[in-house]
Image (cartoon, helix red, strand yellow):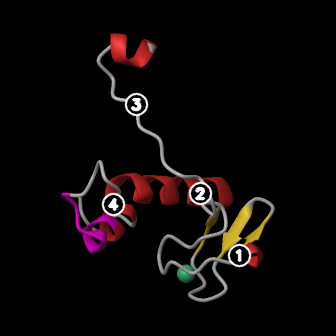
Amino acid sequence: MACELNRVKFRTVAPFYTSTTCPKCGYSDRMNRNLEIFRCLKCSHEDNADLNASLNILLRFITGPYGACCKPDEVMEFNFGKIS
Ligand SMILES: [Zn+2]
């Protein structure tokens, strides 16, 4: 694989519900997404839908088996810019 030749690690995460799940409170609902806009029906978190999905992918990666050293609370604060 090309990335391994360049010493870049390649990992995958399960993509299910990443576009309809709120990265702030974890609530998942198809109605959270309306075309380009993500708006959580539970906590009112709002963001660009694609950016929101990418945050969920990052969260799954960091809190998954390859990022187990991080605590979920720290990840959430990092995602919302509270930790520099
Ligand atoms: Zn929410």
CB within 8 Å, label 1 to label 2:
no
Q: List the residue tagged with mark 2.
A: 53
The relative height of residue 43 versus residue 83 in the rendered view (above or below) is below
| Snapshot quadrant of residue 7 | top left
SS for callout 3: loop
The relative height of residue 20 versus residue 43 in the rendered view (above or below) is above
- Say which of marks 4 and 1 sits in front: 4
What segment is highlighted magenta in the picture? 69-75
Q: List the residue tagged with mark 1.
A: 32
- Distance from disc 2 to disc 4, alpha carbons, whole Å, reads 15 Å
- Distance from disc 3 to disc 1, alpha carbons, whole Å, reads 30 Å
Q: Nearer the viewer, residue 59 or 40?
A: 59
Q: Residue at x 48, y 48 (%)?
A: 13
- Say which of marks 2 and 4 sits in front: 4
- Distance from disc 1 to disc 2, alpha carbons, whole Å, reads 11 Å
Tell me the kind of residue under disc 2. Answer: Ala
CB within 8 Å, label 2 to label 3:
no
- Say which of marks 2 and 3 sits in front: 3
Tell me the kind of residue under disc 4. Answer: Thr
SS for callout 2: helix
Tell me the kind of residue under disc 3. Answer: Phe
Name which of mark 4 and mark 1 comes first in the sequence. Answer: 1
Name which of mark 3 and mark 1 comes first in the sequence. Answer: 3
